[in-house]
Amino acid sequence: MKVVGDEYPPFMVRLAGGLSGPYADAFRLLMHQAGVEVQYQAVPAKRAFLDVSTQGDTCALAVNFDQGESETVNFVGVIAPITLTVYKRGGDKAAIGNLDALRKRRVGAVDIAEIRDFLGSAGMPFTPVKNSSTGFLMLNAGRFDALISDIPPSMDVGKEKPVRLFMLAQVERWLACNAGLPPAVQARMRLALKEGVFAEATLPVWSRYGMRDYYHEVRSSWLKGR
């Protein structure tokens, strides 16, 4: 089965035309256990749904749920949560407790679809940054008063670790497949993804990428709430 997807560091990264990273590797492991072998192809996000809707035996990994697209593709299962969280610099005494307070501040945000859509609908101006690691470095350097990120800060972002202010929203990434995929295959895939890419069997994958703590955090919060 061909599985397409866009780069989404650190969870999915391009590798020789295909995809690697914890999402991709964990998904491959779970599908192998379900008797489904996958071959990855890296494509731009805007092309993923087109490929899935027009090519049989094709799925797209880690896409946004889109009600309009559900008429032409099947959303088989949720693979992971995306938690959008607001941070400020460590040592910054400013009180920023809600979205309205952010409007008066210089805001940086990781440039992913979920954040663009949320801030766009709220009419919130922001400066996009390539990824969370770059964003936290810029936050600590004083480029922003607040940063909206999809993953927590690592330990090497500067002298003072950024402070979590509040959660802006939680959304989910999905597996979408061609509507002609046999129902029996879709059923096996759906069952394999009952805990997304955070099933117990995937712990070695997350550990290999140095994201063991993140894995446990997601299991303790997201899965318990489902």
Image: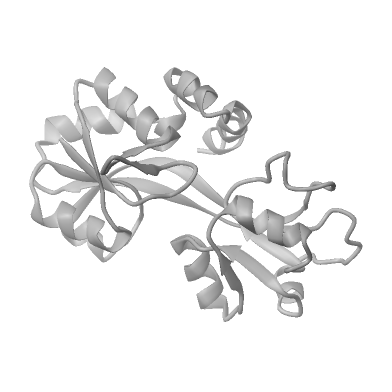
Between 207 and 221, the residue placed more toward the observer is 207
Camera sees residue 84: no
Q: Position of residue 173 (x, y in %)?
A: 41, 48
Where is residue 152, by image quadrant? top right
Q: Residue furthest front?
A: 16
Q: Position of residue 28 (x, y in %)?
A: 30, 28
Where is residue 47, by image quadrant? bottom left
Between 146 and 99, the residue placed more toward the observer is 146
Q: Is residue 127 left or right of residue 140?
A: left
Quadrant in the picture for the N terminus: top left
Q: Position of residue 58 (x, y in %)?
A: 15, 44
Residue plotted at (35% across, 56% down): 65
Residue plotted at (84% across, 46% down): 159
Placement of 155 over or under 192, stated as above or below? below
Residue plotted at (19% across, 26% down): 37
Q: Is residue 88 left or right of residue 128?
A: right
Camera sees residue 224: yes
Residue plotted at (27% across, 26% down): 31
Q: Position of residue 106 (x, y in %)?
A: 72, 75
Placement of 78 over or under 22, stated as above or below? below
Where is residue 138, by image quadrant? bottom right
Q: Is residue 36 left or right of residue 5?
A: left
Placement of 38 over or under 159, stated as above or below? above
Report the colour scheme: one colour
Q: Is residue 60 left or right of residue 204?
A: left
How many numbered badges does the structure rendering display? Answer: 0
